[in-house]
Image (cartoon, rainbow, N blue to C red):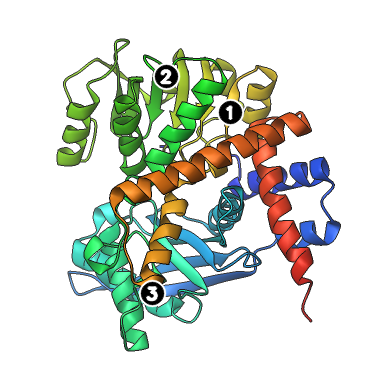
Amino acid sequence: MASQTNSTNVLDSALEQLEDVAALVDLHPDVLAKLKKPKRTLIVSIPTRMDDGSLEVFTGIRVQHNMDRGPCKGGIRYHPAVSIDEVIALAMWMTWKCAVVDIPYGGGKGGVICDPTDMSQTEIENLTRRFVTELVTIIGPEQDIPAPDVNTTETVMGWLMDTYSMQQGYSVPAVVTGKPICLGGSLGRAAATGRGIALVTRETLNTKGIPLEGATISLQGYGKVGGAFADIISEMGARVIAASDISGGLYDPDGLPISELSAHVRETGFIEGFQAGESIGNEELLTMECDVLVPAALENVLTAENAGDVRAKIIVEGANGPTTPAAHRIFTEGDVFVVPDILANAGGVTVSYFEWCQSLQKLFWTEEQVNQRLERVMVKAYHEVYERADELQTDMRNAAMALAVERVGEAILARGIYP
């Protein structure tokens, strides 16, 4: 999937969005000045012993964007394209995401510049434990709570929790979310982001007067998020007519057999090799005629170059930052209804919040309870953003940003500037 290879700088996109909404809601200039800069950026070297005995030194980054509403929250990704600008932008988007669903967190994000597909499990564990050791003074249950992201798993989060706990001298399950159930993870967390996207898609189709039963979906990205979304939206009655991942894509106008496809991806790791439909490329998928397009891979896949060719009625952003500002303007002018990432994919951080609460209180909810609580939060947030869009006579991205930035700004002004 496209990432930093795209010419659009993801941080420039995030800052442009912030400037636009600041003008829309007449944001206090002091609040804008503070929100444009992250609270803290830590860059560390991660010397890691490799299986052949050599030492590889990786670079790790952790950004804490804002803490005015609570501790920072955000994932850690392992990817060759990780950059400081990307991590700052993602941390900023996490601040808005937490605020738009009204949970008491600020935004954080982390990343390590590496290619975990070329590393053994032991090497990834060595890297993770050394990275956590470098972060130990700035993370914690009341300070900054990491989570899984691109190429990190519940296993990695277990190593993170264990390493932090060894530094403290006792188990601290609330330092991380997305960890294994046996270490205090939450039921329902693995599918939470995909479930949240499905719930928002359902609400969007309803407000646009399109029946959910038989609605056509094109999905780019079939990992943890996209796969869970495909399973859940299919169970709701929609038809996933196109799906793709880094290995390629498939198309069937009658709907792909999602349960079988998901089983194949769980077994092999990729869509490639599944015998159904016709083969399509990732770019072709983005421009297929459908009711809903869900980009659920990496950022900057919808650009000024391809936005004019998109034929979906609705775009629900499953990934972080999949649409550049230039592409968004094209969609707005072309009457394509876009549900922004900070709302659409907030299911993951919402259930991470539930997990954190459970870990702090040493109590646990059933999966049914988690899913019911998630549905209440996501449906409420969707309609609050929809109503704010109507009040401001603007699009959903501006409305979601307005709601989020106003909530964070209110906290900043209430706390004041110290000293």
Numbered mark located on residue 338 in the image: 1
Coordinates of residue 316 in the picture (x, y in percent): 50, 31
Coordinates of residue 170 in the picture (x, y in percent): 31, 85
Q: Earlier in the sequence, mark 1 or mark 2?
A: 2
Picture quadrant where residue 168 is located: bottom left
Furthest-bottom residue in this view: 169
Residue assigned mark 2: 212
Q: Are marks 3 and 1 in contact (CB under 8 Å)?
A: no
Asked which secondary structure carries label 1, the reply is strand
Taking the spot 55% from the left edge, 68% from the top edge, the residue there is: 71
Q: Earlier in the sequence, mark 3 or mark 2?
A: 3
Cα gap from disc 3 to disc 1, whole angstroms: 37 Å
Q: Are marks 1 and 2 in contact (CB under 8 Å)?
A: no
Numbered mark located on residue 132 in the image: 3
Q: Are marks 3 and 2 in contact (CB under 8 Å)?
A: no
Q: Nearer the viewer, residue 20 or 407?
A: 407
Q: Nearer the viewer, mark 3 or mark 1?
A: 1
Picture quadrant where residue 94 is located: bottom right
Q: Nearer the viewer, mark 3 or mark 2?
A: 2
Asked which secondary structure carries label 2, the reply is loop
Q: Look at label 3 and name its amino acid.
A: Val
Cα gap from disc 3 to disc 2, whole angstroms: 44 Å
Horizontal side of 106 relative to 227 (left or right) equals right
Q: Residues within 10 Å of mark 3 (few under 14, many from 20)?
A: many
Q: Earlier in the sequence, mark 3 or mark 1?
A: 3
Q: Residues within 10 Å of mark 2 (few under 14, many from 20)?
A: many
The N terminus lies in quadrant: top left
Q: Is residue 392 visible?
A: yes
Horizontal side of 243 relative to 327 (left or right) equals left
Coordinates of residue 355 in the picture (x, y in percent): 38, 61
Q: Look at label 2 and name its amino acid.
A: Leu
Coordinates of residue 239 in the picture (x, y in percent): 34, 18
